[in-house]
Image (cartoon, rainbow, N blue to C red):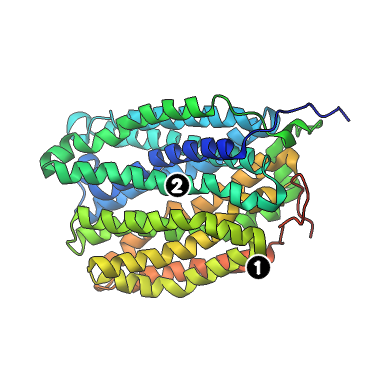
Amino acid sequence: MQPVRPVRAPSMPRLAAASFAGTAIEFYDFFVYGTAAALVLGPLFFPTFSPVAGTLAAFGTFGVGFVARPLGSVLFGHLGDRRGRRPVLVASLLLTGASTVAVGCVPTYGTIGAAAPGLLLLLRFVQGLGLGGEWGGAVLLTAEHAPAGRRALWSSFPQMGPAVGFVLANGVMLALSAALPDDQFAQWGWRVPFWAAGVLALAGLWLRASLTESPRFLEIDDHARVPLVEVVRNHGRLVLLTAGALAVGYAVFYVVTTWSLAYATGRLGVSRTVMLTCVMAAVVVKGALTPVMALLGDRYGRRPLCLAGCAGCALWMLPMVALLATGEPLLMFLGILGALIAFITMFAVIAAYLPELYEARVRCTGAAVGYNLGGVLGGALTPIVATALADHGGRVPWGVGVYLTGIALVSLVCFALLPETRPASAPVLEPATG
């Protein structure tokens, strides 16, 4: 075995801040597309469709990003397991940022015809590739530096990034929507948040420039030749279980942050400003609770938190859709907030849980593929299915609640079949047994 190369111990707050900032920027890129899909992309890129069909088509391009994410996790996971976690952070941020800026430059259907939605589809795919690599790199670099007893806490900082990215994306959209007349917002206002992604990407690259490589990666002297093959051969069941377990989190999150915008503004007549404010306020609370739930994960274990959050989702989905259907801002906020609290009870500890399930030589590929396959199962089709179910139901979209409850029960079974991984005092990550 080769001697371990010495590594300067990083400042955990600095490392966590850099991972958090980069993840927030990448998820800003991903979420700004979801908000635009819910509000304006249907009429601009699918004008020959009916309003409902146009929304479904826009959500279809949204779903392509999820399909691309597992492919990105394979591509960047290979890089992370062979060359290191740090290069993944730079390459994924560049790819996602460039594709997001390009979305803001795509002419609409009225200008270039059918090529417009085709370009939108391609760029959304590239966006998904970049985001598929981001999570694995950011989480592993933090988790593999963190002390064992506080691994969930420090790993939760990248998990707070999506909340900040969402609030930032929707805050920009909200400000532009409130400041501009509808015709100007549809003509050019929606493009501004996409162009801003370029500035954010440069800021993220600057923050990540001085990060050191993971010490656990540097200890490996027999890197996997083809990590994906090794993951499929030795950890295939684990990948499928983690994907099934995480599906409910994606389904719930994208129902309340994407589908609910289209449903409330299109079906109930709630203004864009009111609905975006309700969702953003709930996401802010979710972000604030993330480190609290992570501390509980360090104290009581990863699996109990995941089971509790999953059970909460199963119990809350029907009340949530009933509250949404009222059209009353306070009640809609409470419905969304309950769903996001259940969601973050699970996802606050996932950044520590998934890496601990895999051995270090294939950890970047295994954890990222499982995480992003969960996104395909739970996030890719959920806005489309929810839109279709709501369109064929009454005022209260009970079908959406039943659909989400079913996913939550499947995920609950998957979590129940996974082992606990919380270490007692181990200084480095080791794979779980059992």
Residue with the mark numbered 2: 162
Residue with the mark numbered 1: 416
Q: Which amino acid does label 2 sit on?
A: Pro
Image disc number at residue 158: none
Quadrant for the C terminus, please. Answer: bottom right
User: Residue at 38% across / 64% down in the picture?
Assistant: 337
Check disc 1: other Cα within 10 Å, few if <14, some if 14-19, many if 20+.
some
Tell me if I can see residue 179 in this picture.
yes
**Image height check: is 18 above or below 263?**
above
Residue 407 at x, y percent in the picture: 50, 66
Q: What residue type is labelled 1?
A: Ala
- Look at discs 2 and 1 and give the one toward the viewer: 2
Closer-to-camera residue (247/23) = 23
Q: Quadrant of residue 46?
A: top left
User: Residue at 60% across / 62% down in the picture?
Assistant: 296
Left or right placement of residue 220 versus residue 379 in this view: right
Residue 226 at x, y percent in the picture: 71, 34
Q: Is mark 2 on a helix, strand or loop?
A: helix
The number of numbered badges drawn on the structure is: 2
Closer-to-camera residue (368/180) = 180
User: Residue at 56% across / 65% down in the picture?
Assistant: 411
Quadrant for the N terminus, please. Answer: top right
Left or right placement of residue 70 versus residue 318 in this view: right
Left or right placement of residue 47 versus residue 364 in this view: left
Residue 346 at x, y percent in the picture: 55, 60
User: Residue at 20% across / 36% down in the picture?
Assistant: 189
**Image height check: is 174 above or below 193?**
below
Q: Which of marks 2 and 1 is nearer the N terminus?
A: 2
Q: In which quarter of the image is residue 165?
A: top left
Q: Is mark 1 on a helix, strand or loop?
A: helix
